[in-house]
Image: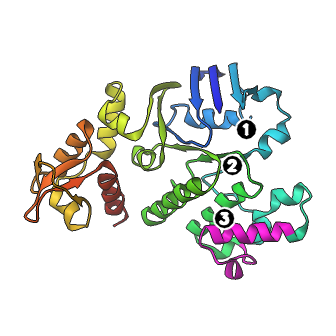
Amino acid sequence: MIEFKNVSKQYENNLALDKLNLTIPTQDFFVLVGPSGSGKTTTLKMLNRLIEPTDGNIYFDDKRIIDYDLKQLRLQMGYVLQNIALFPNLNIQENIAIQAESLGWPRKDRIARARHLLSQVDLDPDQYATRMPSELSGGEQQRVGIIRALAIKPKVVLMDEPFSALDPISRKQLQDLVLRLHRELDMTFIFVTHDMHEALRLGQHIAVMRLGHIQQIGTGEEIMQHPANDFVRGFFQNEYTPQPATIQTLLDAGYGQATTATATLAADAPISELAAALKQATPVVVTTPQGPRALSTPDLLDYLAAKEAD
């Protein structure tokens, strides 16, 4: 478990964090979301002490982060950057194994670990292990950046807007990938994004931040259905109020499940009505010629992600 207790960060002319209190459960997929300047990246970088707090304490496994040996702390925290930062003079398996090499792992073990991780992210090690970073696409490089952070089996993986520079199709593929990795690995993922849609797709718990303060913490459904204030409500609506289209569009795309429940919306209603209804309850049952169908919050989010990719 990670805890922030009354943590503040004062820069020369800017209070980036103001008495932040936050608990991140072990093995959670925790997302920090908010507009630029909200303090989310500062919060993330405090965990591996790239930034030190002005006041307050951060605890990792019931021990103050400041009391850890810095190298030992960082070995427990993988770090994935937006700009990937692969070493251009090292091949892919050497990039993945760079920390293992610094720890003195035998070459055989380093290569085996790198090849195993490449397989986990659907990159054939026979094809990719000895390639150079310049031979990979942006999405492939980001996959390597992710597994490099996993190479020595850290307890925590820190991800700072890792997909924001990618095209929509690659972005959705990598979102699906990190969700799968999180399910398979006993690690805590902490993910920073300015995109509420991405936060809702990924986060088991989400902290919405603004001007160094947390506005709300909850699951995606809790935040959608019960926004804590006008900022949270507006942040979601401004980013994700769907463009005029009907619910039938989702049904035609294969979303929804047959049900015997009583319908509350018609298929020719605009998607905006579905979004509003899902804030009150999920699933929402829709009338169709084939009978009632139930649509859930994940149905709407996956439809919007696919629509963005188009």
Q: Please say if 206 is above or below 166.
A: above
Mark 1 neighbour density, 10 Å: few (under 14) some (14–19) many (20 or more):
many
Tell me which residue sits at (76%, 44%) in the image. Answer: 76
Confirm whether the magenta stretch covers residue 22: no
- The main secondary structure of the magenta stretch is helix
Tell me the residue that label 1 is attached to. Answer: 48
Q: Position of residue 294 (x, y in %)?
A: 22, 53
* Tag 3 secondary structure: helix
Q: Earlier in the sequence, mark 1 or mark 3?
A: 1
The reply to whether residue 92 is visible in this rendering is no
The quarter in which the N terminus is drawn is: top right
Tell me the residue that label 3 is attached to. Answer: 144
Q: Which of marks 2 and 1 is nearer the N terminus?
A: 1
Describe residue 226's horizontal placement relative to residue 273 as left or right. right
Tell me which residue sits at (44%, 33%) in the image. Answer: 218
Q: How far is disc 3 from disc 2 in space, using C-alphas?
A: 12 Å
Q: Please say if 273 is above or below 116.
A: above
Tell me which residue sits at (52%, 55%) in the image. Answer: 179
Quadrant in the rendering for residue 101: bottom right
Q: How far is disc 2 from disc 1 in space, using C-alphas?
A: 9 Å
Tell me the residue that label 2 is attached to. Answer: 79
Q: What stretch is highlighted in magenta?
A: 109-132
Mark 3 neighbour density, 10 Å: few (under 14) some (14–19) many (20 or more):
many
Q: Where is residue 193 in the image (x, y as percent from the top left)?
A: 50, 44
Q: How far is disc 1 from disc 3 in space, using C-alphas?
A: 21 Å
Q: Where is residue 19 in the image (x, y as percent from the top left)?
A: 58, 17
Q: Which of marks 3 and 2 is nearer the N terminus?
A: 2
Describe residue 100's horizontal placement relative to residue 259 as left or right. right
- Is disc 2 in contact with disc 1, using a CB cutoff of under 8 Å? yes
* Tag 1 secondary structure: loop
